[in-house]
């Protein structure tokens, strides 16, 4: 049996504490004679503060020096947790490489729930030795982190490609089949070769390549997480580029999701060529509806609190008889879309 791929085993542990390295020994000898400001200056010049240095700081009789030690101890703990998380993220691929797989492709998509814009899929093949700190499911990352990781993923990738299904394609075949079409385009865009394909979610019917589906894969598998970042950033950039031509909808801020600003834009300007007309909430938004319907509609689209959303999901049962059946169906769909947006 092959040994686990060395590049996916995470960082090597520090040497045993029975050995004392030069810098730490020097600090131990010098620390009693150093002022607090000199200690702070010394630490600021170090690329990394190790456990031995932290232990020495924590044992110093001065409160200010011990406080510095506590800060660096907390940093070491965060770094250790991140190393363990990244090791778990590499686990599936490590096993595949141990079985002799040459390349691992992660596949994911972004943009199934929005009212407007395309659905974008990405396929990414990372170098086996690539380590990308903070790599995670794109939904758990803020926008600046996603943008930074997008560049790091591209640099660490052996190969990558994206596939895009337009709003017209979504309206023609439905969002599920459009998402599959985008994923097929992404995988087809890779250089031909032998690889294992890992897909976020459930198995895909009629997918032309053998693949392994991993539920929650964008948070459990390195390559799928990388694909989720590439797909999300690619789509977000596309939506921002539409803002200049269609400012009423605030695509730069909402990326096509059903926010209150987006709702107001539809009411004031109608639908753009990039709206998904077969999404029931979209074509219902253009109609006035009852006062009760409009109040619920605006509150759901403006909701940013999961607990409040759950309350509305419970309270909606009491609306029977106060709205038209079509309005009730739209409210229920809006709640599902909001839940997908807030809970991922």
Image: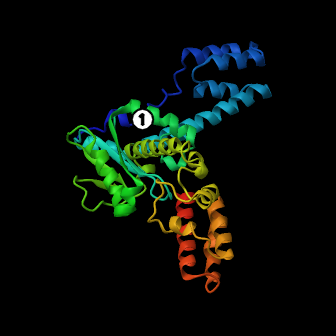
Position of 186 compared to 116: left or right? left
**Percent x, y of residue 151:** 46, 32
Residue farthest toward the left in the current orientation of the protein: 193
Q: At x 58% / y 59%, what residue is drawn?
A: 266
The image quadrant that residue 77 belongs to is: top right
Q: Can residue 214 be spotted in the picture?
A: no
Position of 163 compared to 236: left or right? left
Residue farthest toward the bottom in the current orientation of the protein: 321
Please give the residue where the numbered disc 1 appears in the rendered image: 153
Q: Nearer the viewer, residue 214 or 286?
A: 286
Label 1, secondary structure: give it. helix
Q: Nearer the viewer, residue 223 or 96?
A: 223
**Percent x, y of residue 255:** 54, 49
Q: Nearer the viewer, residue 309 or 14?
A: 309
The N terminus, quarter of image: top left
Looking at the image, residue 112 lies above or below residue 96 = below
**Percent x, y of residue 2:** 24, 39
The image quadrant that residue 141 belongs to is: top right
**Percent x, y of residue 89:** 42, 45
The image quadrant that residue 66 belongs to is: top right
Q: At x 52% / y 58%, what residue is drawn?
A: 271
Tell me the colour scheme of the image. rainbow
Q: At x 58% / y 70%, what residue is drawn?
A: 287
């Amino acid at each position: 049996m092959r040994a686990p791929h060395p590049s996916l085993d995470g960082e090597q542990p520090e040497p045993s504490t029975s050995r004392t390295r030069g810098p730490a020994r020097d600090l131990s000898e010098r620390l009693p004679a150093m002022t607090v400001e000199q200690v702070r200056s010394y630490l600021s010049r170090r690329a990394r503060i190790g456990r031995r240095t932290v232990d020495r700081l924590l044992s110093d009789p001065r409160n200010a020096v011990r406080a510095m030690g506590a800060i660096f101890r907390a940093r070491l703990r965060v770094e250790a947790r991140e190393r363990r998380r990244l090791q778990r993220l590499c686990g599936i691929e490590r096993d595949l490489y141990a079985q002799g797989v040459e390349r691992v492709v992660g596949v994911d998509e972004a943009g199934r729930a929005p009212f407007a814009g395309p659905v974008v899929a990405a396929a990414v093949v990372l170098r086996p030795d690539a380590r990308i700190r903070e790599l995670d499911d794109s939904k758990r990352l803020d926008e600046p982190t996603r943008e930074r990781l997008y560049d790091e993923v591209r640099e660490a990738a052996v190969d990558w490609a994206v596939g895009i299904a337009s709003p017209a394609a979504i309206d023609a075949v439905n969002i599920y089949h459009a998402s599959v079409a985008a994923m097929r385009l992404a995988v087809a865009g890779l250089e031909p070769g032998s690889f294992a394909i890992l897909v976020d979610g459930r198995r895909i019917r009629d997918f032309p390549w053998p693949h392994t589906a991993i539920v929650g894969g964008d948070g459990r598998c390195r390559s799928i997480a990388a694909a989720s970042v590439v797909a999300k950033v690619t789509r977000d950039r596309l939506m921002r580029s539409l803002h200049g031509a269609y400012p009423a909808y605030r695509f730069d801020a909402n990326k096509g999701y059903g926010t209150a600003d987006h709702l107001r834009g539809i009411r004031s300007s109608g639908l753009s060529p990039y709206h998904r007309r077969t999404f029931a909430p979209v074509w219902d938004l253009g109609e006035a509806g009852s006062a009760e319907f409009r109040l619920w509609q605006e509150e759901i689209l403006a909701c940013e609190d999961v607990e409040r959303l759950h309350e509305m999901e419970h309270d909606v049962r009491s609306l029977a008889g106060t709205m038209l059946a079509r309005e009730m169906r739209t409210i229920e769909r809006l709640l599902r879309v909001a839940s997908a947006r807030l809970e991922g």
